[in-house]
Amino acid sequence: MPGICWSFLLLVLFAHSCRGFYLPGSYMHTYSTKDAIYAKVNSLTSIETELPFSYYSLPYCKPMGGIKKSAENLGELLMGDQIDNSPYRFRMNVNESVYLCTTSSLNEHEVKLLKQRTRDLYQVNMILDNLPVMRIAKQNGVNIQWTGFPIGYTPPNSNDDYIINHLKFKVLVHEYKGSGVQIIGTGEEGMGVISEADKKKASGFEIVGFEVVPCSVKYDPDVMTKLHMFDNISSVNCPLELEKSQIIREQERISFTYEVEFVKSDIRWPSRWDAYLKMEGSRVHWFSILNSLMVITFLAGIVFVIFLRTVRRDLTRYEELDKEAQAQMNEELSGWKLVVGDVFREPNHSKLLCVMIGDGVQITGMALVTIVFAALGFMSPASRGMLLTGMIVLHLFLGISAGYVAVRLWRTLKGTTEGWKSLSWSVACFFPGIVFVILTALNFILWGSKSTSAIPISLYFVLLSLWFCISVPLTLVGGYLGTRAEDIQYPVRTNQIPREIPARKYPSWLLVLGAGTLPFGTLFIELFFILSSIWLGRFYYVFGFLLIVLLLLIIVCAEVSVVLTYMHLCVEDWRWWWTAFFASGSVALYVFLYSINYLVFDLQSLSGPVSAILYLGYSMIMAVAVLLSTGTIGFITSFYFVHYLFSSVKID
């Protein structure tokens, strides 16, 4: 608790000291006419393989000064982003057609690689002033927006492949007249401020849109090689005939060109991401989530009201009797009152339970704080990797809460602090250890595929250093605070001899599995959009709805676990500890099964066993995190419910 109080105090002080700022976005750049602007290129990506590769792994034109990597944060590195400079140079408000370079004759390896990347539907991801390039294509008369553009294309009923070698860019610009308004943001350029003193410097043009029309054009290499990089050429129309398009085959020399048109726009800089965040089928998305929220809230409300009335009636009947009648009632009646001497008996595998509860508190806190900050606009899409970086940092520092809760529960179960250091180490290593093992196995596959999403050895050492130098010590500090915290006293004594549990007509695991369906009903619609954003490259930015769904999920998990715990106690089964955990935690099984369903029916384009193994590996990590988080919510609620229930009963 002291750690939480200090964190909250620092947050309040920070919020008090902040000035107004635009969210989302990064530091705004303004350009004067003819200022040079260089585009950057990110990793090549595909929804078929989910294996990103470096842009320069293909025979593209290279910048004059050589390839230079941009500084990347931890989240970008883990997501497989590799942002490099490119030879594409624009000059503000200068419309021009430009020659870049002509490759040497393609060899067998280059042709094979280009054909493979083309048929795997790889996309080039280009960035200008921190905006990803957007391609607008028409499908069935409807405009569909895509980020990136394809490497090439394969015509229907053809074995030939054609490369995209001419790009028609349209850059939307808005004239900005420095108003002296302060703008603070965290983007790829770090933090910046535009103040009254920089009014003149800030005036100019800001980039608010970046679109492309990709073409394949066959040039005469003998003519093109006489040109130099950035020489002007005549404008080119995208050819419709395959004979005028650039085929991919051995000994071909490919010339790369582009043209750029600057168009003035009324879009303001703070709104420039709106076009990217528009989701197709948004009306269905909003109505389906609202419907889900209303149905689940209604069901949970009914269950909770009925449940409260039942418990209150039992307590009232029990407490209105005198002592002799109570004794007679104990002999005649069955139910939760008969397990009063066993309800707080230490469960099997109590250390594992404490470890999982500690890690669950850590994951739940990380998810809640991250989604709150994202809903407030701090996790801007302009700041690539910021969401994942924020989650990792929060997970590291919330180790103190994991250690505290786990050790305090351990003291409650054991009645002693002996072994708290070993427990704290186990908490610090349990979930991160599972993630580390899965990621290492997947990383060997990625290394073998030479993908940019493979974690380099240097980053492994960074992650291990963060783990053992920040997370582990903080977990130990939290464990120490747990040893100093006030004991949780049981309201009743535990008998020395365990009470025999009556035979059940049906196994308890059946109820546990059924209980997971209600929390899953809260989650599954939002889960579809989250999986689509991860695996289909779509932007996900409805964090406000995600926050509502998360809060509703917490409530439903708590209610389901309490109801199932009460049902177990009513049939004189005092082994409620693990049941309370898995009653709500069983939603993780449905999440994993839904992930498999999504792989089979919605990711039909995913090709090859490597891609499927990667998908299942990451889905397993997600399912374990959901198990620990939802299980912890259910367990803690049930623990305090059982504590309150038996402290309300008069026991001699």
Image: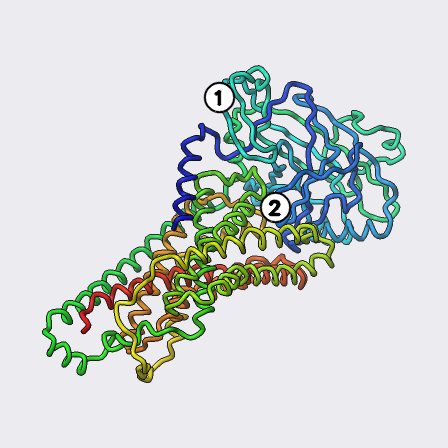
Task: Name the residue: 57% across, 41% down.
Answer: 145
Observer-nearest of 303 and 574 = 574
Q: What residue is pinned by disc 1?
A: 181
Residue 620 percent across, percent down from the top left: 55, 63
Q: Position of residue 377 (x, y in %)?
A: 47, 38
From this view, report whether residue 230 is shown above or below residue 493.
above
Taking 560 as reference, is 305 left or right?
left
Estimate the x, y position of residue 535 in percent, counting from the top left: 58, 53
> Who's the residue at 62% across and 34% down the image?
211
Q: Position of residue 592 (x, y in %)?
A: 51, 63
Few, some or many residues within 10 Å of mark 1 (<14, 14–19, 20+): few
State the image quarter where residue 468 is shown: bottom right
Residue at mark 1 to residue at mark 2: CA–CA distance: 31 Å
Relative to 38, residue 490 above or below: below
Q: Residue at x 49, y 57 (%)?
A: 476
Q: Secondary structure at mark 1?
A: loop
Classify residue 631 by image quadrant. Answer: bottom left
Q: Which amino acid type is marked by label 1?
A: Val
Looking at this view, is 161 or 208 the one in front? 208
Q: Residues within 10 Å of mark 2 (few under 14, many from 20)?
A: some
